[in-house]
Amino acid sequence: MTKLSVNINKIATLRNARGGNVPDVLKAAKDIERFGAQGITVHPRPDERHITFKDVRDLKKIVTTEFNIEGNPKEQKFIDLVLEVKPEQVTLVPDTQGQLTSDHGWDTIKNKDFLTEIIAVFKSKNIRTSVFVDPVIAMVEGAKETGTDRIELYTESYAHLYNKEREKIILPFTEAAKKANELSLGINAGHDLSLDNLAFFKQNVPGLLEVSIGHALISDALYFGLENTVQMYLKQLK
């Protein structure tokens, strides 16, 4: 079964909109684990507009499943945080300052030297590494050359076209996954995966180890409740 890691950024966004500690990010993380999710994901950005660096430190103390920290390793503050907290996994994402959300994967060929160097730093501390990539064979091959443990397939294009041409749009993801399996790279995926499109993605991406889902899952929880929503997503991954 593919593992579900829940990105709790949006819970922090709601808390920060009002100040104080409602909703409680730490309690939400513990409850999400209790409801069956196999991981907690956070993506602290330099402006700390949702998950704060303090949140990351506090979450490390209470998360009992896999803790996954996403972010841009070109930010020294991010590197220092990851090395301090030592999560089970760090996912390297090429975000820029002030970016609304992640919108592309790494060019693993042009950034090979940089990625190789920073991945070696994280792996020296026994932190599993994953590199955010588009579903392009050359980028998967380039990721292998960096020494990363896994790739995370950026799934926005799949989600965007799922209702119009899912049979066509899934093909590059299937091929990228086959190449990753051939190269002994672990496969994660994330971005705009939802109850509508998750099962089909899982069925057509061989070797999918983990999905990271935040925005859609937290939005669904407004209607279905958090516990029920986590269970609904887990069902899609069976």
Image (cartoon, helix red, strand yellow):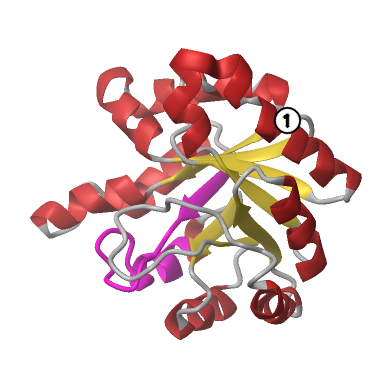
Write down the residue under mark 1: 174
Taking the spot 82% from the left edge, 36% from the top edge, the residue there is 178
Specify start and end residues of the magenta stretch as a single range.
Answer: 39-59
Give whichever of 197, 64 is nearer the camera: 197
Rendered-image quadrant of the C terminus:
top right
Relative height, residue 222 to residue 43 (above, below): above
Instruction: Estimate the x, y position of residue 21 in percent, counting from the top left.
Output: 20, 56
Can residue 235 be seen here? The reply is: no
Is residue 73 in the magenta section?
no
Is residue 41 in the magenta section?
yes
Instruction: Estimate the x, y position of residue 3 in percent, counting from the top left.
Output: 65, 36
The residue type indicated by label 1 comes to: Thr
Can residue 157 be seen here? The reply is: yes
Give whichever of 100, 47 is nearer the camera: 100
Taking the spot 55% from the left edge, 36% from the top edge, the residue there is 37
Relative height, residue 174 to residue 6 (above, below): above
Instruction: Estimate the x, y position of residue 122 in percent, counting from the top left.
Output: 68, 76
Disc 1 crowd rating (10 Å Cα; few below 14, some 14-19, many 20+) is some
Q: Residue extending furthest left?
A: 18
Q: Secondary structure at mark 1?
A: helix
Relative height, residue 13 to residue 145 (above, below): above
Taking the spot 12% from the left edge, 59% from the top edge, the residue there is 19
225 with respect to 164 (left or right): left
Instruction: Estimate the x, y position of residue 115 in percent, counting from the top left.
Output: 66, 74
64 with respect to 209 (left or right): left
154 with respect to 97 (left or right): right
Rendered-image quadrant of the N terminus:
top right
